[in-house]
Amino acid sequence: MIIITDGLVIKETSTKENDKVITILTRDRGIIRAFANNAKKLGDPKNNATGLLAYSKFEIYKGKNAYSVNSAEVKELFMPLRSDLAKMALAQYICELSGELSPREENSEEQLRLLLNTLHFIAKGDRNDRTLKAVFELRSMALAGYMPNLVCCDNCKCYEHERMHFLPDTGIFVCGDCLKLYKQKAVFVGINVAYAMRHTIYSEMNMLFALNLDPDTLNIFERTCELYALRHIDRQLKTLDFYKIIRK
Ligand SMILES: [Zn+2]
């Protein structure tokens, strides 16, 4: 069976001299792992289009046990990312996270759009990369089925509270007055981070990256979103460790 779909290469692994296996977040089929034979050959039409962070139109053959790339045509390569080590490290982390959180054999239009938009803003360089990272983490979790309930305090239903807390195990807000009723781990977020988290979960995609946070708010927002994103991943993400080393 032949599948024609757009997708972003989120991982590439060499196999033989000219061959590799690539992992693609596709629009129509979610995560696909496919052989790309000869793709490492300079001059092969698939070369650029199957590289890491290439957004391409793919023609993929689905065999009995494996997928293989018949042809690929570049749509976007995010060139400005490639000359900046910190941006590249962040891009690789969000790709790895996307690989963990995106579905297989299912339409992944929203996941792909989120990933492409985040890469676009990282490449463009006019938004804070730490904000982009946090927004990507929290929004990805919501898309992956871990939609937090950030409307109000889980107990008293108050909407605004100076001492709002986030409970990462269940994805809820609990205010400072009600916190004693809950036994789970709680992270103090305060009112500004609560607004930023709500924005990330409930805004339309075209407004998603408009957040502009002061340094204190960003510190807490960043820590909280990362904690929540890693909550359901039971292994260490090497790309995240690398990003943190590079960023220092
Ligand atoms: Zn409360």
Image (cartoon, helix red, strand yellow):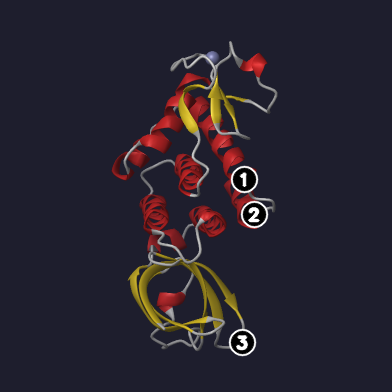
Whichever of labels 3 and 2 marks the residue nearer the N terminus, that label is 3
As helix, strand or loop, the secondary structure at mark 3 comes to loop
Q: Position of residue 160 (x, y in %)?
A: 44, 16
Q: Quadrant of residue 123?
A: bottom left
- Which mark, by number, is residue 16? 3
Q: Earlier in the sequence, mark 2 or mark 1?
A: 1
Does ligand 1 reach within 8 Å of label 1's beta carbon? no
Q: Residues within 10 Å of mark 1 (few under 14, many from 20)?
A: some
Mark-to-mark CA distance, 2 and 1 = 9 Å
**Residue matched to label 2:** 237
User: Which quadrant is home to the N terminus?
Assistant: bottom left
Residue nearest the viewer, comparing 156 with 213 = 156
Q: Are marks 2 and 1 in contact (CB under 8 Å)?
A: yes
Whole-percent x and y of residue 51?
Answer: 47, 73
Which secondary structure lies at badge 2?
loop
Amino acid type shown at disc 1: Leu
If the picture is divided into quarters, which one holds ligand 1?
top right
- The residue singled out by tag 1 in the image is 230
Q: Residue at x 54, y 56 (%)?
A: 89
* Quarter assignment of residue 207: top left
Kind of residue at disc 3: Lys
> CA separation, marks 1 and 3?
33 Å
Number of disc labels:
3
